[in-house]
Amino acid sequence: MKNRLYKTIVEKILSLIHEGIFPPGSRLPGERELAERFGVSRVTIREAEIALEALGHIIIKTGSGAYVQDLGENSPGALPDVTAFELTAARAVIEAEAAALAAANMTDEGIKHLESLIKAMSAVHPNGRDEGDDIDRQFHLSIAKMSCNPVVEYTIEQLWRIRNELPQVQKVYSSVCVTDAKARTDEHASIYAALRDRDPAAARFAMREHFQRLFEAMLVATETSAFEEVKRKIGEDRKRFMVTTQI
């Protein structure tokens, strides 16, 4: 739980950085202030800042504090400004081929590891979003590693950085994973079955099917969100109209 907690704080601080609350060059509030702001211990804040520094988002100066780095488009470690749909399209191509490579290189130890992740995923409580996301990440990165190609593994790690660090992407993914946890588990089980059978074609197909379903679920989620936003604005306009007509 503690491990997931500091990751949650990393995500919250990143959101504030992207929103401009903590702009590039600015000094982050002290550990005590951040701990009070997020309702966690100073140790958790310290762990989150260490992770943020490792990712290149901040620099910690001894005796001075933590400062937000300016990650321009050409800076090392900077992430591209993409949508959840663009990311998913890329993942569908790259991770499908990674699955095919992994199936051809699958070991008994690898099969056991993936099986344990599937069992853990199926046991996640419906409200355990953070735990489910963590297992999901382990599953995909494990397949990337089993592809036995370091370039493929590195590329998929960067895709997951985009998935977890860009607020606009994370928001869409979170809405889908919360509402469709069972489908996610079933799809990962299908991928696992193909890998267990050491069938590259089936593994590629199962991974593509997973992202196709994810893409469709994202469309529904974003359409629903847009519809709710329209209803909210109409409600506000109606209230303003009622006030003016009563004057």
Image (spheres, rainbow, N blue to C red):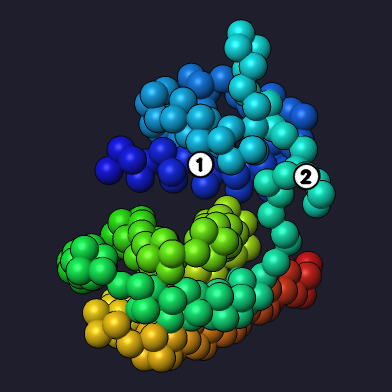
> How far separated are the C-alphas under marks 2 and 1?
20 Å
Quarter containing the C terminus: bottom right
* Residue found at x 26% / y 69%: 107
Q: Residues within 10 Å of mark 1 (few under 14, many from 20)?
A: many
46, above or below 101, in the image: above
Q: Which residue is mark 1?
A: 10
Residue type of the residue flagged with mark 2: Ser
Q: Which residue is mark 2?
A: 75
Quarter containing the N terminus: top left
Residue type of the residue flagged with mark 1: Val
Residue 39 in view of the camera: yes
- Spot occupied by residue 146 in the image (x, y as percentages of width and height): 38, 65
91, above or below 50, in the image: below
Task: Determine contact: label 2, label 1, CB under 8 Å.
Answer: no
* Residue found at x 67% / y 42%: 17
Q: Earlier in the sequence, mark 2 or mark 1?
A: 1
Element type where label 1 sits in the image = helix
- Spot occupied by residue 137 in the image (x, y as percentages of width and height): 40, 61
